[in-house]
Amino acid sequence: MRDFDSKPLPLDQADGLRRLFARKRVQMVPVVSNPHVAFGGVMLERLCAGFTELGLHVLVVDASERASAPSELAVMDLADAIEPLSEGVSYLAARGLAIRHVDATGSTAPFLTALTDAAPRAEVILVHAPATELARLFARSAELARRSGDESALVRPLLLADDRPASVTHAYAALKLLTQRAGLVVHDLMLAAAPNSPRAERIAIQLATCADDFLGAVLRDWVRLDPATDASEPPAEALRRWVRETLRVETSARAAAATTPYYVDRPQRAEARSAMN
């Protein structure tokens, strides 16, 4: 007679995500694509340089609006569709690919597990995609973190923008969507702007203030990137600092939310609010 009492308990829906984020060597970094940014490729290259400088292997999963459609190989076997770009960087054209992994709840989180299985060398996976795609991918991990206090499941989306109004408006809309739809309330910003740009710091203050005042969200940190930087140059110190912070295993939502958002005083906050109205 079969011993039903010894039957193992079924795995819940979040089990795959628990196992995924429990792999301390794999760091998921959601990068919010922005079609209004003129130097998106440079920004991704600099991000990769920041991680590879530490000896980490990076997989860039490009599901942005401008990315190429995935090859037919990606449907059959993700591993066959991953292209090595250098010793430390691999690339996967993935526009529209995540939705092929959607489950009955509408989540595409199984795609994240498929990526780690397809790229066992990857220690950092940059998922470059629109906010709507990132919400479907990471909302479940945010919910898991809230329910269980599992800090290893937390991610911090990285917004991309430059110092032109259209890109800033798009970045704010993405922040709003990820906060309200996915429960991802802590964000960072990479801003492409010349070192002498008079608008760069003002933009960071404006985004941080509006995120706090209107959404209850936090812009935890921002990094300025000079778009004229040569690819052979080492990463800027600000980017190195951001990479170190991102790789911290002990990062928690509480610690991030306790970090002072990037604004200075109330006159600046009032000015930023008026600029967004």
Image (cartoon, rainbow, N blue to C red):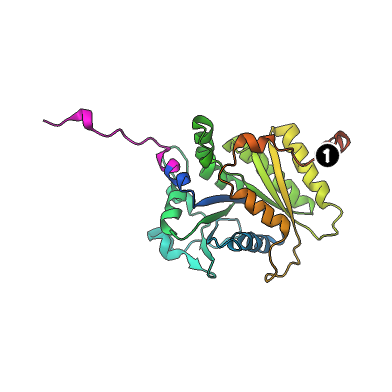
Instruction: Decide which of 48, 177 is in the foreground and name it.
Output: 48
Outermost residue on the top side: it is 5
Q: Position of residue 195 (x, y in %)?
A: 82, 60
**Does the magenta stretch mainly form a helix, a strand or a loop?**
loop
Decide whether residue 44 is among the magenta residues. no
Residue 26 in the figure: left or right of residue 263? left
Residue 36 in sight from this viewpoint: no
Q: Residues within 10 Å of mark 1 (few under 14, many from 20)?
A: few
Q: How many marks?
A: 1
Question: Is 107 drawn above or below residue 238 in the view shown?
Answer: above
Identify the residue at image location x=52%, y=32%.
Answer: 149
Residue numbers of the magenta segment:
1-18
Asked which secondary structure carries label 1, the reply is loop
Q: Quadrant of the N terminus?
A: top left
Q: Position of residue 71 (x, y in %)?
A: 46, 64
Q: Quadrant of the C terminus?
A: top right
Outermost residue on the left side: it is 1
Q: Position of residue 25 (x, y in %)?
A: 49, 52
Outermost residue on the right side: it is 267
Q: Amino acid at mark 1?
A: Val
Instruction: Decide which of 136, 224 is in the foreground and name it.
Output: 224
Question: Is 64 drawn above or below residue 273 in the view shown?
Answer: below
Identify the residue at image location x=53%, y=51%.
Answer: 27
Q: Position of residue 259 (x, y in %)?
A: 70, 38
Identify the residue at image location x=76%, y=37%.
Answer: 210
Residue 211 in the figure: left or right of residue 87? right
Residue 55 in the figure: left or right of residue 231? left
Instruction: Decide which of 115, 262 is in the foreground and name it.
Output: 262
Residue 10 in sight from this viewpoint: yes
- Which quadrant would residue 212 be assigned to in this image? top right
What residue would you read off at disc 1? 264
